[in-house]
Image (tube, grey):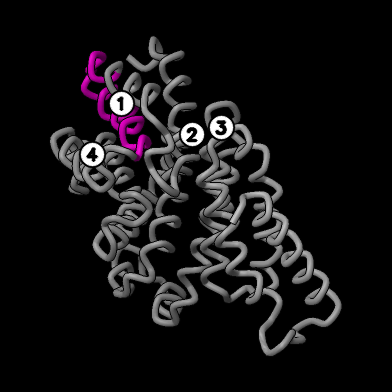
Amino acid sequence: MRKGKVTLRGLLVVALAVMALGSFGCMKLGGITAVAAAQPVVDDLLNKLLDTSNAQVLAEGLPGNVVLITGLAEMSPKDRNMLTKCCLAYAAWGMMIEDNDPKFATQLYTIAKSYGMRALKTNPKFAKAFAQGKKIPELAPLFTSKDWADTLAWTALATGLEIMHQMDNPMALMGLPDSIALISQSVKLNPTYFFGVGKAFLAAYYALLPSFLGLGGGPDVSAATFQEARDVTGGKFLIVDVFEARYLCTYTDNQARFDELMNKVLNADSAALKGGQAMNEVAKMKARYFLSIKDTLF
């Protein structure tokens, strides 16, 4: 199906959902709520956006689609799939703009995290234990099905990205164990989810964490985990290289490896990663940005 055709169909179904639910509350259309009917289209729309060949098109088109997805999620506030899609969309939006507008990106990550937590709370056992004051690291193992890998991953990523933009804030750093626990459980359930993004994010965190903190950090563990992440796609997911250059190479003061990885990203074929071309284009944007500020990173 052609990309434009999918987008048009998506907008029509979303509009139908908004009108139907806005006028008739929980009225069903042919036995299926409008929100439920729109869900496959939302999935398809996000998949098409994440595989677009132009990062600028994604950057300009994503905000409008995030608003539509948010509206649908709020019409069905206990729908884990829609809440997770919101978390993903806001986190992706933040990643697109964080280099130029870090303050707004942090706000987007905060919103993403809130939707992720709402999605996690659709698990009754988690919701009850969390309300009783139990901490996320001890609750993460409650999620035992592979189906939860996406919610765990995006909630963890949103939490972690929010923290990365507030590294000088001790209160923000308190969320670090939560992020690591959630992403670790996601990786345990499905280590290849979304091209191995969980492993890539863990590797970046390990680069930032001294091993003595007891959270599994340190440069050796980081390097090994980056390689595990790279192996998931045979090196086609370029975010892995950007993260290694930005976090591990700067920590170990390895400028030669930094240059090697960034140039590899810029010379790679983004389309080689089917379903993730847009993320590779984002990786190239970040590679150009980090190269332009290299003197401040070393």
**Upstream in sequence: badge 4 or badge 3:** 3
Q: How many neighbours does mark 1 have within 10 angstroms: few (below 14), some (14-19), or many (20 or more)?
A: many
- Secondary structure type for disc 4: helix
Q: How many neighbours does mark 3 have within 10 angstroms: few (below 14), some (14-19), or many (20 or more)?
A: some
**Upstream in sequence: badge 2 or badge 1:** 1
Query: How far is mark 2 from mark 4, CA to CA?
Result: 18 Å
The residue under label 2 is 282
198 vs 93, left or right, is left
Between 114 and 152, the one nearer to me in the picture: 152
The residue under label 3 is 102
The numbered mark at residue 226 is 4
Q: What residue type is labelled 4?
A: Phe
**Upstream in sequence: badge 4 or badge 1:** 4
Between 40 and 1, the one nearer to me in the picture: 1
**Upstream in sequence: badge 3 or badge 2:** 3
Query: How far is mark 3 from mark 2, CA to CA?
Result: 16 Å
x, y (%) of residue 54?
Answer: 57, 34
Tell which tag, 4 or 3, sits nearer the viewer: 4
x, y (%) of residue 169?
Answer: 45, 38
- Secondary structure type for disc 1: helix
